[in-house]
Image: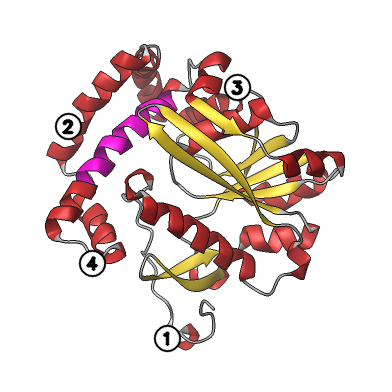
Amino acid sequence: MQALLFYLSYPFLYLIASLPFGALYKVSDFFYHILRLTGYRKEVVNQNLRNSFPEKTGAEIEVLAESYYRYLCDLILETLKTLTMTEKEARERCNFHSAGWLDKLYQEKRSFIIVMGHYGNWEWAGPSFTLNTRHQLVVIYRPLSNPYFDKMMVRMRTKFGTRITPVNLTLRNMVANRGMLTATTFIADQSAPQDKTYWTTFLNQDTAVFTGPEKLAIKFNYPIVYINVKRERRGYYEVYLELMVANPKETAENEISETFMRRLEREIVLDPTTWLWSHRRWKYSRKPQSATANTAS
């Protein structure tokens, strides 16, 4: 059944991916109306926005929700466009801002860890990094349940030279890659299970934070780099790298995780539209016994 679903869907998906960008965004506009009619995760989006911005009126929340749904349709089709995107298009659509310290890390033969959120077009940020730097990008990902669609996504994500690693093999592959200059990337704002978290306040809500990137950074003493993907206009992004933590072994417990969440929060508040509001980010509650144990400083 999974194979049948894929082979029936793939010609249609490839056809859409083959459209020029102008036509692609007309399809996105059409999908936006379909998405709104279906009420896709309407309550999740509205609740997340209301809880994150309690100072905003109902009308303001509705405007944000509408802007988000329009962007979500663009994001889905832009991701699909990766199937047929050329290197020239990848460079033009994501303007990569390099930094002197990045070359310095390469000269010092230091690998590093990237943390970023589901903000802007994170899928296009991968090719942008790979095409503009000398470090080998390795993206940590969760395989899709349908192996056929998963294989398609792997092909899309690796077409320009990026490597990907299933999340359960992260440590093993990082050890195996120690002889290579790598940039191991975590999209680190997803929901985290209660037994492996640091709790903080993020967007006015109790939030469980996945601490894997921090622990690995300390273990290998790899610097932490934050990537910010800003949408300048429809279909065009600016990719900025920030050296967030140079020496992880010198940090206090949870300092890296807290710094990342504060940095991401600042960007979301500046432009909420391009964050993934339809994700059930706050599906876990802090256990009473840990209410005072892991609190943001």
Instruction: Report if the CB atoms under discs 2 and 4 are less than 8 Å apart.
Output: no
Q: Which residue is mark 1?
A: 288
Q: Can residue 77 be seen by looking at this rendering?
A: yes
Spatial distance from mark 2 to mark 4, Cα to Cα? Answer: 30 Å
Q: In the image, 187: left or right of 164?
A: left
Q: Which residue is mark 2?
A: 34
Which amino acid, by three-letter code, is at mark 1? Pro
Q: Earlier in the sequence, mark 2 or mark 4?
A: 2
Q: In the image, 84: left or right of 64?
A: right
The structure residue drawn at horizontal position 21% and vertical position 56%, both measured from the top left corner, is: 46
Spatial distance from mark 2 to mark 3, Cα to Cα? Answer: 31 Å
Spatial distance from mark 2 to mark 1, Cα to Cα? Answer: 42 Å
Which image quarter holds the N terminus?
A: top left
What main secondary structure does the magenta stretch of the protein show? helix
Q: Which residues are magenta?
A: 65-80
Q: Tag on residue 55?
A: 4
